[in-house]
Amino acid sequence: MKKFPLPLIALVASLSVTNAQQQPALLTEPPDGSEAIAPEIRVALRPADVEETTVTRQGGRDITVQRLALDPNDPVKPVISVKPSPAPAVPAGETQDAAPTAPTYLTLLSASVYAGSLTSVRWVHCREDGASIECSGWSNVDFNHFSGISTFLGTDGQPHCFIMGIGNEEFPAEEAPQFSGTAPAFIPDQKNLPAEALVLIDSLHKIYATEGAKLAAAHLGRERAAKAKAAELLANPPQPKDLIIRYRIAETPLPTPAEGDAQ
């Protein structure tokens, strides 16, 4: 049977896994395409601030480069060399306790959505001992709906952050297994995968069970907004705008000797 390559690789950063099972939840609202565009910020300058101006014409627009005078109210601070402070001594027979930090795992994830909203998913789970496990499987959830979120609370009680790359196929997935129901589900290709390797996928499916309608509606909103934006650009193509580049040149002073340095 012909194999089809999976699309982009996404980087998913997740914190350490614990045995505690909690109800996963979204940490941010999924964008629906109605987000306002930030207004353009313009900075007013006095003529005395401009020391030199050069204007060139390129690509149907003027490119203005201006060198600005240094702001007398914001002088350049001298660079002072500082000796590193010695680490505090630890009394004999005692150990220095360090604040516990949760290890961060980097997971590689790729997804292909086929006709019928079946998604083929692959990722690599990195264990605490440095070993890695290649995982893959099938989901009956359209992973396009997850493209609007980047953070969520997992079943391990820890926040997860992920960036997903995704591709879409117009033909059915011939290799996909049969799902017994319509509830969000994932069927792994491998048997006996450790529970910590499935935290990310399990959390996303449990979130979809409660927030699926919201995620699907937000995805449709983003698609409508993208089509409207494309139609607007086609009907009213943007004209080249003049560009202004402003910069200041400040001399970096030599480091001044810190107290106790040899002269």
Image (cartoon, rainbow, N blue to C red):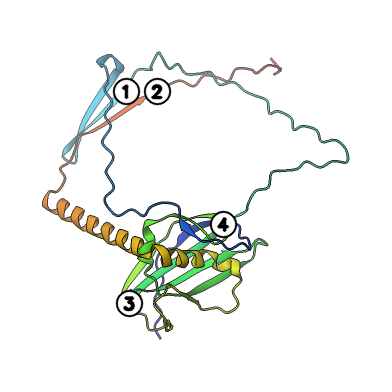
Q: Secondary structure at mark 3?
A: loop
For mark 2, what is the residue? Answer: 249
Disc 3 from disc 2: Cα separation: 59 Å
For mark 4, what is the residue? Answer: 157
Badge 4: residue crowd in 10 Å (few <14, some 14–19, many ≥20): some
**Mark 3 vs 2, N-terminal side:** 3
The mark tally for this picture is 4
**Horizontal side, residue 58 vs residue 96: left or right:** left
In which quadrant of the rendered view does residue 3 lie? Answer: bottom left
Disc 3 from disc 1: Cα separation: 58 Å
For mark 1, what is the residue? Answer: 67
Q: Amino acid at mark 1?
A: Arg
Q: Secondary structure at mark 4?
A: loop
Find residue 21 and name its label: none
**Mark 4 vs 1, N-terminal side:** 1
Q: Amino acid at mark 3?
A: Gly
Work out which quarter of the rendered image holds the C terminus and state it.
top right
**Mark 2 vs 4, N-terminal side:** 4
178, 120: nearer the viewer? 178
Badge 1: residue crowd in 10 Å (few <14, some 14–19, many ≥20): some
Q: Secondary structure at mark 2?
A: loop
238, 213: nearer the viewer? 213
Tell which residue pokes out farthest to the left in this image: 235
For mark 3, what is the residue? Answer: 116
Q: Amino acid at mark 4?
A: Gly
